[in-house]
Amino acid sequence: MKLQFLGATDTVTGSKYLLRQGKSSVLIDCGLFQGYKQLRLRNWSPLPIDPVHINAVILTHAHIDHSGYLPLLARQGFKGKVYCSPATFDLCRILLPDCGYLLEEEAEYLNRHKMSKHSPALPLYTRDDAQRCLAQFEPVNYRKEWQPAEGLSATLTPSGHIPGSAFVQLNNGRRSILFSGDIGRPNDLVLAPPSPMDGADYLVVESTYGDRLHKKTDVLLELADVINRTAARGGAVIIPAFAVGRAQSLLYHIHLLKTQGVIQDLPVYLNSPMAANATHVYERNRSELRLTATQCRALAHAAQIVHTPEESRLLNARRGPMVIISASGMATGGRVVHHIKAFAPDKRNTILFAGYQAGGTRGATIVGGASSVRIFGEDVPIRAEVAMLDSLSAHADAAEITRWLRGFKAPPRQTFITHGEPAAADAMRLRIERELRWPCHMPYYLESVSLD
């Protein structure tokens, strides 16, 4: 087997791993690069393999940094199957067309305001491209072995990150390789913990939080404190949240706080039709959650759903205590950007981030303490309070990843550290080498290795 790293090296985005076995080529994950412009430009560069020659794609989960390149891959000639869990397929049917729509909307905005050096600016792909690629999906149940391509068998095992997320293990009869995708938390309030694994000859492991530990604090009390002090000022809490995962977790936490009387019964708005649709996927896949049917219903009804753009614009004119949860989680696009523009200049309000902010994103700029942020060609002052809830992350931290790795029956011949900023990935490498004494390697972009 040969493995080539087409993304998620020195960055937390663009996850793509090309595995070659004999005449077969399988892509594990097919994500978009996000964040810094030099990373986003890679989305426009040709892959080192003609998509026509890729036999299959296997997804670890549905998040765009793991699935968002698929419509372009299909448009470029990929004709094979896209294998994933049933819940991942359900979520991709929501996420991929929405991503195509946002790309079209961005290109249209650039053309309308003559803000692009290209004439006309074109979207990376369209909503129609995304709809067409969905016909190539073939859901596979957890722990069922199948053959994605000649000479390779594969299995999916729940990883606890979002519904449908999976560890992907492939075997050629002589050697095996395990891809962690994104690893969930062992004690999440909503999601079941990541499954223990016996291990593999080779391991590709994420390192998003490889250089830090989540705070040992009560995230419910932290969230309540932010909401209460903002409400006391008469302000609004604006929460950029990933439509799948973070939005649902926030809704459940807010439901608990209201039920326990820790926060007042203030209005809560979910301004993301995609997040609302994703919440129904949670309800249909309750076996992957810690929640009862009653708790699932409470999560689904914890907020007023904002459906139309007009309703979204009206929210910006509201004042007084309220919570607005809206995508995207790193404030790179979507309706939350309009809310930040409207509410960030007022010191009574709070912008609350509830997860990792990749370098080069608008979210990272705000969390980094910038006095203003560029939105639609305008410098918007940040006078609102900026708060961060790391403990609400759906990614395992360095200690939690190490604890999961300790469950392996034998050490891998080689562990590849990916899906982390350089400092985080190197810290994860050092931790594994020192605590587990496993050989590790941090691959570089487009590096190829032989798995003998």
Image (cartoon, rainbow, N blue to C red):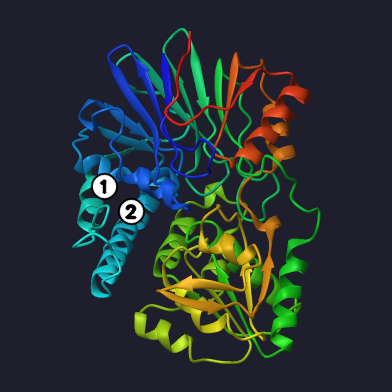
Tell me which residue sits at (64%, 82%) in the image: 349
In this view, the residue farthest toward the right is 216
Q: Quadrant of the N terminus?
A: top left
Residue 439 image-quadrant placement = top right
Please tell me how many numbered marks the rendered image carries: 2
Q: In the image, which is nearer the foreground, mark 1 or mark 2?
A: 2
Q: Position of residue 199 (x, y in %)?
A: 60, 21
| 126, above or below 377, in the image | above
Question: Circle 2 is placed at which residue position?
Answer: 96
Position of residue 309 in the picture relative to residue 408 (left or right): left
Position of residue 10 in the picture relative to residue 378 (left or right): right
Q: Position of residue 120 (x, y in %)?
A: 19, 62
Question: Circle 1 is placed at which residue position?
Answer: 134
Tell me which residue sits at (55%, 18%) in the image: 202
Q: Position of residue 356 (x, y in %)?
A: 60, 54
Q: Position of residue 38 (x, y in %)?
A: 43, 47
Query: What secondary structure is marked by label 1?
Result: helix
Kind of residue indicated by mark 2 = Leu
Position of residue 248 in the picture relative to residue 75 (left or right): right
Q: Mark 1 near mark 2, Cβ–Cβ under 8 Å?
A: yes
